Image (cartoon, rainbow, N blue to C red):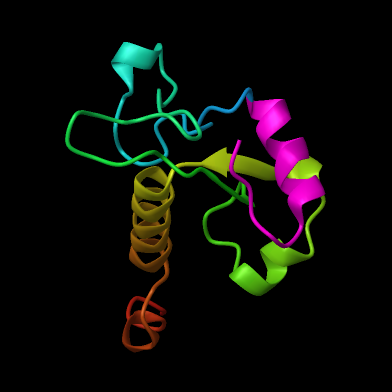
Amino acid sequence: MSEPIVAADLFRAVMEAAGGRCQCEGECGQPHTKGEGRCRREHDKYAGKHSGPVRLMAAAADPLTTDLQAAALPASELRAWCPPCFTAARRIAKRRQTSKAPTKDQCGLFDL
């Protein structure tokens, strides 16, 4: 199994807990119906005919966690993500976060 040069023990712990498979359960916007609700991509396996092997990463369960904060997290707070799922989950989470927050111009709009 390929693994990173740095923090290999942490990476192995996360991959072992995940069974070497991406732990996305639809946070990326895909239903993952063929994988029974979970992404089917596996570490070092091929995703399809025309792509190279999948390299999973150990990243924070909350996609909005910054890389700096995630580097300090223990293995129990990390998940195995394939890059496409993590990127999409982060984009969706950011979009939801910004759509819920009122802008400064609207804060007092309906105050009486």
Rendered position, 91 above or below 18? below
Give coordinates of residue 14: x percent, y percent.
71, 38
Quarter of the image that includes the C terminus: bottom left
Choose top left, top right, bottom left or bottom right for residue 17.
top right
Rendered position, 105 above or below 73? below
Nearer-the-camera pick, 9 or 78 = 9
The answer to whether residue 20 is magenta is no
| Residue 57 as seen in the image, left or right of residue 28 | right
Quarter of the image that includes the N terminus: top right
Give coordinates of residue 16: x percent, y percent.
71, 28
| Residue 68 as seen in the image, left or right of residue 93 | right
Q: For the view shown, which residue lies furthest in the left direction? A: 50
Nearer-the-camera pick, 51 or 109 = 51
Q: Main secondary structure of the magenta part?
A: helix
Choose top left, top right, bottom left or bottom right for residue 4.
bottom right
Which residue lies at the image location 73% right of the left edge and 62% below the top edge? Answer: 6
| Residue 61 as seen in the image, left or right of residue 9 | left
Which residue lies at the image location 79% right of the left edge and 40% below the top edge? Answer: 76
Nearer-the-camera pick, 65 or 3 = 3
Nearer-the-camera pick, 106 or 64 = 64
Give coordinates of residue 15: x percent, y percent.
66, 34
Residue range in magenta is 1-18
Which residue lies at the image location 33% right of the left edge and 63% below the top edge? Answer: 99
